[in-house]
Image (tube, rainbow, N blue to C red):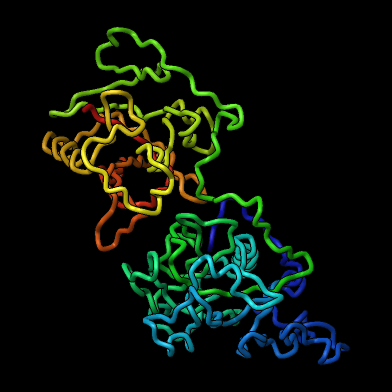
Amino acid sequence: MWKRLSMTMKNNVLLASCGLLAVTLVACGGESGGSPTQSNSEGIQNGYNSFGNTLTDSRDGQVYRTVTIGEQTWMAENLNYAMDGSYCYDDDPANCAKYGRLYTWSVSKTACPSGWHLPTKDDWWTLFDLVNEAYPDSAKWALLAKGYDHWPKAFDAYGFSALPAGEGGFYGELTRNLGYKWLNHTAFFQISTSSCSVSCDLVCLDDDCAAVFLPNNSPTSALSIRCLKNDAFYQEPSQSSAKSSSSFEISSNSAEDSCVDSKSVSCPEQSELGTICDNRDGKIYKVVTIGTQTWMIENLNFSSCDIKGFCYDNDPNNCNQYGRLYSWTDVMGLDKSYQNKYSNLTGLQQGICPQGFHIPSNVEVDELITFVDANGGDAYLLAIMFGGKKSSSDFSDLDKKAYFWTTDEDHSDFGSPNNVIIWTYSEAFGFGGGSVFKDSGLSARCVKD
């Protein structure tokens, strides 16, 4: 079953009144697409034939199967309309004919035929809620097309026939750093969002997906599209007032319009042994020497008019307990344009650390972990606080895992200008690492120069 924090069944009146029928192609025993007294001409509108369950795209004449599930009518095939920013897997037209085209986020917003739209996350949840209700133990397999080796449990209960069309990973002008991958393995679909500057959500349908919505879709990744028929309540999304879901521009404890940075404060001439004082705001942080390094053993909790970060769940009490969560550009003191390009910084980087301290490099983190492992593997001296993280869509892992930035951008074969190397710690697995998007919200630990 697909899960979310608040399970709300929506738009399932038809399904419930029909006794939880698996397929709602018919209205409780009637003909699909309206009352039996409708004429054929009334059943065809904007290329959609409600009697034949087909959609003819007037732009190129292609005909798609459709399926009505609950009160929604979906395309039952992946879109295959050619436009700039859309691609065939492996650049092979045969793959477009079988799996449909793959679209980048920017073009996906306008790719659907007239009278149809790119689904939002709420649109998808309406579908998933209905499937969860009907198939609580096998929902993830109920929408997948049968006949693929990697999907042996697929039973395509509704005729939705999701295809494992894979994805295309592109940067800039179609530089194939990642190329095409996951064909015949995973179905990825674009989601309609108001903005997607660095990363945004995608739909992932496969037994290996960590969740049905994943917050790691690059705007330049090319994914499949399923269009949804507009209903009587559909409104075109407003572009004028939209803000990026991955933006870190809103403070969790101050009003932007009236923000005034405080001047430097007077710190004690000699701080308590084992502490430092940040003269920007007077906060005192504990420090400890581990091997040849001196580390802050509290997470940074500095904010200013330009650098605000987030408190977990936007609760100031979490900032007081766990420190703040910052994007990488905020931690490094860089313009947000570097969320999409390499900065190639060298040397010590103070970033937003107090005077005399800096954001650690990956080499410095390795030195720390090597010393700790060589001395019994006990990281208690670091007083790790499991402050969790913020993705483009939500907060997660509070009291479970700690995530920290390094200065090192990810130049590996699987990295990109959007990624940075991080270090992590959890009680279950100890030290770890990885690579995340620069607009993620992670904690900051500073090390002495």
Extreme residue in the top direction: 269
Residue shown at the point (62%, 67%) measured from the top left: 119
From where the camera sits, is residue 131 visible? no
Of 127 and 227, which appears nearest the observer? Answer: 227
Q: Whole-percent x and y of residue 444?
A: 35, 35
- Residue 239 higher or lower than 396, as above or below: below
- Residue 52 higher or lower than 416, as above or below: below
Extreme residue in the right direction: 37
Residue shown at the point (42%, 60%) measured from the top left: 210
Q: How many marks?
A: 0
Q: Is residue 339 left or right of residue 54?
A: left
Q: Whole-percent x and y of residue 188?
A: 47, 70
Residue shown at the point (69%, 86%) measured from the top left: 53
Extreme residue in the left direction: 374
From where the camera sits, is residue 361 visible? yes
**Res 109 → quadrant:** bottom right
Q: Quadrant of the image for the C terminus?
A: top left
Q: Whole-percent x and y of residue 338?
A: 38, 48
Of 306 and 203, which appears nearest the observer? Answer: 306
- Residue 205 higher or lower than 252, as above or below: below
Q: Whole-percent x and y of residue 316?
A: 52, 29
Residue shown at the point (43%, 81%) measured from the top left: 88
